[in-house]
Image: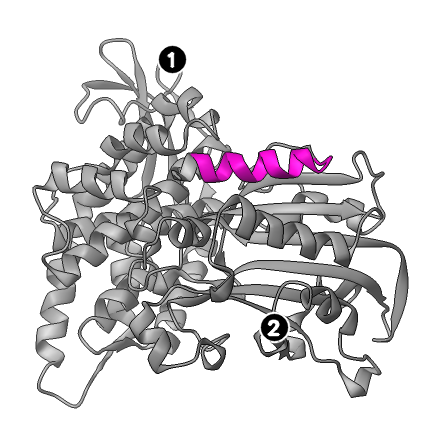
């Protein structure tokens, strides 16, 4: 099955079980102060789960685009280096709001995986909550009993509170969960080591693919638990991991979710995939990051220097640097990947095609802006790395890291990434000191003392620097600057270009 067929089969299966298939919510969240990005499929249903919104459909299913690059869900450093972590990913999910519960959730999960997708049942494992004596919670024998209809007892594994008890936060709906894991190792490897020993051990080929959450309690402010009046089923399955398992691959990046994008990167750069580890990592990073950037722009979040926009700019610059250093791409190229991304995902997310021109334009402008300073910044960083080699100093001074950030647009985590490749780190304390000094300078510069404007002639002002680097002007007014703006600059002047277009200097 292709990835498109797998995604559609999930929606069709749960539609056949009387679920309302709903569109993905935006990946960028604008109306929830607790989140910048959708990081799980349940985010759009949070108000329903909390009882703050009415239940429109008792059964729901969807494929939700998610982003995890901050907080406890931060996989950024693993992306491209391992086989299954991503920044943007899709989560297939089905929900029940006060309708069915554990029996149906487990039965339908098994039916979909084994009967529809034809996954080998001998490679599947299920975990259940082992209980918590301090909270007076027993083992989830109910879920274990249902799993016994499908799995032998030895492949029904007890899990601790960290892995198998889901909570939305310090208070609110919560409950035990049951994870489904799959062993995609070769028969030879499976004969050597029992998969039971590798479940929840971070093995790249014995991985969780589906989490069935059974919300049956409410966590009160005093920490106690009370039963929910309406129990909720909330499941989430990693689409990229599922596709890997169905297509018989051992890496998400080897599936048709990513291979067309990776092939396009190879076509643009002239670098084949599979011959050089560092170049392969660079391609995987770029293939992952272009999805995050494109979907963010589609959802209305442009790269910027603040909050969610800064997260997207960091990710974009991280990808540009990988292309620059390892694929010798010194010109903008990532925007050329957008048509291929649309070919792969546009059927499920038609907003990509609708916003194609905007996505390409924004990415190209961001690439060019960073490339103008990237080479100089990398030369500076290479010089510092060379000077530190052979010495007992393996930490870059905070002032240099801040200069890279402030002057050359290097996000701190990008500097850290480059340094890690050379066994070095950053003096964070020194960086923070310089950052605080910059904030103080900005505050002082804002306290401007000036005289009154002196009018010379009529005319307005408009910034034209985006289009022109030179412009003949006439002074239209000026004023004396007593304090602030720039030292040694006694006047602020407004000027009018000779061609009639105004500017301010």
Above or below: residue 387 compared with residue 181: below
Label 2's element? loop
Residue at figure coordinates x 49%, y 38% from the top left: 7
Residue at figure coordinates x 17%, y 74% from the top left: 422
| Spot occupied by residue 277 in the image (x, y as percentages of width and height) | 15, 62
Tell me where residue 131 sits by quadrant: bottom right
Image position of 367 (left or right of 171): left
Q: Which of marks 2 and 1 is in front?
A: 2
Image position of 371 (left or right of 439): left
What range is drawn magenta here? 5-19
Mark pair 2, 1: CA separation = 84 Å
* Residue 124 can be seen in this image: yes
Image position of 366 (left or right of 324): right
Looking at the image, which is closer to me, 366 or 452? Answer: 366
Above or below: residue 77 compared with residue 430: above
Q: Is residue 49 found inside the magenta-colored segment of the image?
A: no
Give the quarter of the figure containing the C terminus: top left
Which residue is at the far bottom?
Answer: 392
Q: Where is mark 2, residue-wise?
A: 152
Residue at figure coordinates x 17%, y 43% from the top left: 372
| Spot occupied by residue 84 in the image (x, y as percentages of width and height) | 38, 59
How crowded is the residue under tag 2: few (<14 C-alpha within 10 Å), some, or many (20+)?
A: few
Q: Where is mark 1, residue-wise?
A: 459
- State the scheme by which the image is colored: one colour
* Residue 505 can be seen in this image: no
Give the quarter of the figure containing the N terminus: top left
User: Counting residues from the N terminus, which is met first, the one under dot 2 or under dot 1?
Assistant: 2
């Amino acid at each position: 099955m292709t990835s498109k067929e797998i995604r559609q089969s999930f929606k069709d299966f749960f539609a056949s079980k009387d679920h309302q298939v709903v569109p993905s919510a935006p990946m960028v969240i604008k109306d929830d102060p607790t989140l910048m990005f959708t990081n799980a499929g349940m985010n759009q249903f949070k108000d329903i789960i909390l009882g703050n919104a009415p239940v429109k459909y008792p059964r729901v299913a969807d494929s939700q685009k998610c982003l995890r690059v901050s907080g406890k869900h931060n996989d950024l450093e693993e992306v491209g280096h391992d086989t299954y972590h991503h920044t943007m990913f899709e989560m297939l999910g089905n929900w029940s709001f006060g309708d069915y519960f554990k029996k149906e959730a487990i039965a339908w999960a098994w039916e979909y995986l084994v009967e529809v997708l034809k996954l080998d049942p001998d490679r599947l494992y299920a975990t259940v909550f082992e209980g918590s004596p301090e909270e007076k919670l027993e083992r989830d024998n109910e879920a274990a009993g249902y799993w016994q209809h499908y799995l032998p007892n030895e492949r029904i594994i007890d899990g601790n509170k960290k892995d198998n008890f889901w909570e939305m936060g310090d208070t609110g709906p919560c409950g035990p969960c049951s994870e489904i894991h799959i062993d995609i190792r070769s028969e030879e490897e499976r004969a050597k080591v029992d998969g039971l020993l590798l479940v929840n051990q971070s093995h790249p080929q014995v991985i969780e693919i589906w989490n069935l959450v059974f919300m049956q309690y409410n966590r009160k402010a005093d920490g106690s638990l009370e039963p929910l009046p309406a129990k909720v089923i909330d499941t989430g399955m990693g689409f990229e991991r599922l596709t890997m398992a169905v297509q018989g691959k051992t890496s998400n990046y080897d599936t048709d979710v990513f291979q067309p994008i990776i092939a396009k990167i190879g076509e643009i750069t002239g670098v084949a995939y599979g011959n050089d580890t560092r170049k392969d990592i660079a391609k995987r990073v770029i293939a992952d990051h272009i999805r995050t950037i494109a979907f963010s722009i589609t959802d209305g979040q442009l790269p910027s220097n603040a909050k969610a926009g800064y997260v997207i700019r960091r990710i974009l610059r991280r990808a540009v640097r990988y292309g620059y250093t390892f694929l010798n791409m010194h010109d903008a190229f990532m925007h050329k990947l957008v048509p291929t991304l649309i070919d792969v995902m546009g059927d499920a997310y038609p907003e990509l095609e609708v916003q194609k021109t905007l996505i390409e334009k924004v990415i190209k402008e961001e690439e060019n802006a960073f490339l103008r300073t990237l080479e100089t910044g990398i030369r500076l960083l290479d010089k510092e790395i060379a000077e530190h080699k052979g010495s007992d100093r393996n930490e870059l001074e905070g002032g240099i890291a801040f200069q890279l950030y402030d002057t050359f647009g290097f996000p701190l985590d990008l500097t850290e990434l480059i340094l890690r490749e050379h066994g070095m780190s950053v003096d964070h304390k020194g960086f923070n000191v310089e950052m605080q000094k910059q904030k103080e300078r900005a505050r002082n510069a804002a306290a401007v003392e000036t005289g009154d404007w002196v009018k010379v002639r009529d005319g307005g002002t408009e910034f034209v620097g985006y289009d022109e680097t030179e412009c003949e002007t006439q002074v239209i007014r000026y004023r004396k600057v007593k304090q602030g703006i720039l030292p040694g600059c006694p006047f602020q002047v407004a000027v009018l270009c000779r061609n009639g277009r105004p500017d301010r200097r």
